[in-house]
Image (cartoon, grey):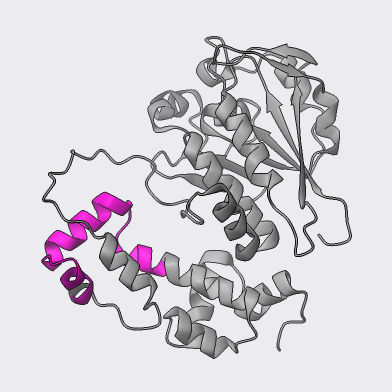
Amino acid sequence: MAGTRPHRVVVLVRDGVVPFELGLVHQIFGRARDADGTPLYRVVTCATEPGRVRTDADFPLLVDRGPDALRDADTVVVPASHAPDATDYTGRLTPDLAAALAHRRPGSRLASICTGAFVLAAAGLLTGRRATTHWRSAALFRRLFPTVELAEDVLYVDAGEVLTSAGEAAGIDLCLHLIRCDHGAAVANEVARDTVVAPHREGGQAQYIRLPVPATTTSSTAAARDWALAHLGEPLPLRALAARSAMSVRTFTRRFRAEVGVSVGEWLLQRRLERARELLEDTDLPVDRVAVTAGFGTAASLRAHLAATLHTSPSAYRAAFRGRVPAS
């Protein structure tokens, strides 16, 4: 978006809003900069009508902007509300909320955090789409909105122009995902480093894993993961990774999923895709070298995985983030 105005993110808050969810949107998007240090986003907050907005904490918000701010939004974010009569619990849009959403510009991107997905669903924006929400609200959501394909065990869902995320921390993952889609991994990773959060958690990662408190003698798969990240270009058989953690393959695979939320194979694929994207964005390495360095072995394998996950080719992906003409 070089040479154009910053992407405008508008957060629509309601009584009962969770301050953390509002703050994370401002924090994550507000720290995104281009190579010259120019802000890539402008974040503003609006309410169904200007004035005092109750939060779920012991302080209110004073919001200057009303719903007309949605007319200029490139992305609209709807955080959760903990008000007892909120759409998040009833599944019904209040008249003022329905009127506010009517100001949204056609074609603008929509995103929700936590039970903010109830608002999008009540407005008919998730009908026939895949979506997620907080796991504790999944049963209610499914009952109220049977036409939505609910994925209750993931961090976030990207359904194109409409995106939904699970609990508060998953909102951070979603915002970083949007920045990564808009400007690439380098910008998103810099924001993550600046805010001291994980640079990339895949949307399909489990949002909640019930774990017993481990005994102090229980080992972890962390060392194996660190070693794998430093050797992505090499074969990484399960037996070798398990040996790094001094575990049997069976114990290692069970504990890995318990700690990370996905299988070893899924995690390795995610990390290799992330590495390949970084190399395509930041280097001039030929595609076959990118494939080898990231651990895919061949350019054909890399092309197949990029097509399956991002619906693009390595050359087209590089062109999108580096302004180059794709190789024929």
Establish if 99 lies above or below 45.
Answer: above
Q: Position of residue 165 (x, y in %)?
A: 52, 40
Residue ID at (52%, 47%): 173
**Residue 282 lies in the magenta-colored region:** no
Residue ID at (57%, 72%): 278
Residue 125 occupies which quadrant of the picture?
top right
Q: Is residue 203 left or right of residue 279?
A: left
Establish if 51 lies above or below 121.
Answer: above
Establish if 150 lies above or below 241.
Answer: above
- If the image is split into quadrants, where does the C terminus sit? bottom right
Q: Position of residue 58 (x, y in %)?
A: 56, 11
Q: Decide which of 79, 222 is in the foreground and name it.
A: 222
Residue 102 occupies which quadrant of the picture?
top right
Residue 104 visible in this rendered orientation of the protein: yes
The magenta region covers: 240-269
Looking at the rendered structure, the number of numbered marks drawn on it comes to: 0
Q: Position of residue 126 (x, y in %)?
A: 59, 37
Q: Decide which of 316, 4 is in the foreground and name it.
A: 4
**Residue 262 lies in the magenta-colored region:** yes
Type of secondary structure dominating the magenta stretch: helix
Residue 132 visible in this rendered orientation of the protein: no
Q: Decide which of 5, 227 is in the foreground and name it.
A: 227
Establish if 70 lies above or below 2.
Answer: above
Residue 10 occupies which quadrant of the picture?
top right
- If the image is split into quadrants, where does the N terminus sit? bottom right
Q: Position of residue 37 (x, y in %)?
A: 77, 58
